[in-house]
Structures are given as structure tokens and as C-alpha cells.
Image (spheres, grey):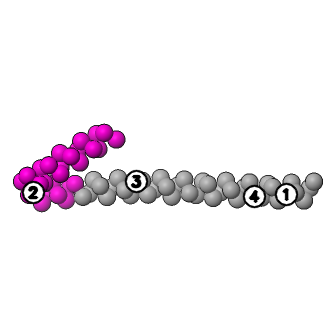
């Protein structure tokens, strides 16, 4: 994660000092890509939790009727 922070810092420094449009675009792209990656992880985690809770509820219901 520190490598991403260093790249972002370098791009932001270059973008603000030189007012380079390419650096600004690259900086924004890096931030957006990292947020999309984080969003994908949260979506996957949410899916697994939902499936897990559904299975636990199903097992509890089945064992309640058996016992």
C-alpha cells in the first residue's frame, strides 16, 4: 500500500508544481482504480456474509423442526 501512496504523492506533486494535465489525469485515475478495487472487495465480502447468514438461518430452521 505504501507504493501506491508514493506514486500518488509523486503524481500530485508533479501535477501541482507543473500544472501538468497528464499528471492530474494519472493521479485521478489511480485514485479511482483503487476505489473500484476496494468496492469490489466490499461487494464480495457482503455477498459471502449474506450467503453465510442465509445458510445459518436455514440450518437453524431445519434443526428446529427436526428436534
Q: CA distance from mark 1 to mark 3?
A: 38 Å
Q: Which residue is mark 3?
A: 37
Q: Element under label 3?
A: helix
Q: CA distance from mark 3 to mark 4?
A: 30 Å
Q: Which residue is mark 2?
A: 20
**x and y percentages locating residue 4 in the rendered image:** 29, 44
Q: Which residue is mark 1?
A: 62
Residue at image position (8%, 57%) is: 19
Q: How many C-alpha atoms fall within 10 Å of the one at disc 4: few (<14), some, or many (≥20)? A: few
Q: Element under label 4?
A: helix
Quarter of the rendering containing residue 16:
bottom left
Marks 3, 4: nearer the viewer: 4
Q: Which residue is mark 4?
A: 57
Would residue 30 appear left or right of 56 to someone viewing this image?
Answer: left
Q: The C terminus appears in which quarter of the rendering?
A: bottom right
Q: Nearer the viewer, residue 10 or 36?
A: 10
Q: What residue span does the magenta drawing correspond to?
A: 1-27
Q: How many C-alpha atoms fall within 10 Å of the one at disc 2: few (<14), some, or many (≥20)? A: few
Which mark is first along the chain, 1 or 4?
Answer: 4
Quarter of the rendering containing residue 39:
bottom left
Which mark is first along the chain, 1 or 2?
Answer: 2
**Residues marked 4 and 1 touching at CB (< 8 Å):** no
Which mark is first along the chain, 4 or 2?
Answer: 2
Which mark is first along the chain, 3 or 1?
Answer: 3
Q: The N terminus appears in which quarter of the rendering?
A: top left
Residue at image position (68%, 56%) is: 53
Residue 49 image label: none
Amino acid at each position: 500500500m505504501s507504493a501506491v501512496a508514493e506514486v500518488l504523492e509523486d503524481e500530485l506533486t508533479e501535477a501541482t508544481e507543473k500544472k501538468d494535465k497528464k499528471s492530474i489525469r494519472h493521479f485521478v485515475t489511480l485514485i479511482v482504480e483503487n476505489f473500484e478495487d476496494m468496492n469490489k472487495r466490499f461487494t464480495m465480502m457482503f455477498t459471502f456474509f449474506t450467503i453465510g447468514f442465509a445458510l445459518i438461518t436455514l440450518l437453524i430452521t431445519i434443526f428446529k423442526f427436526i428436534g
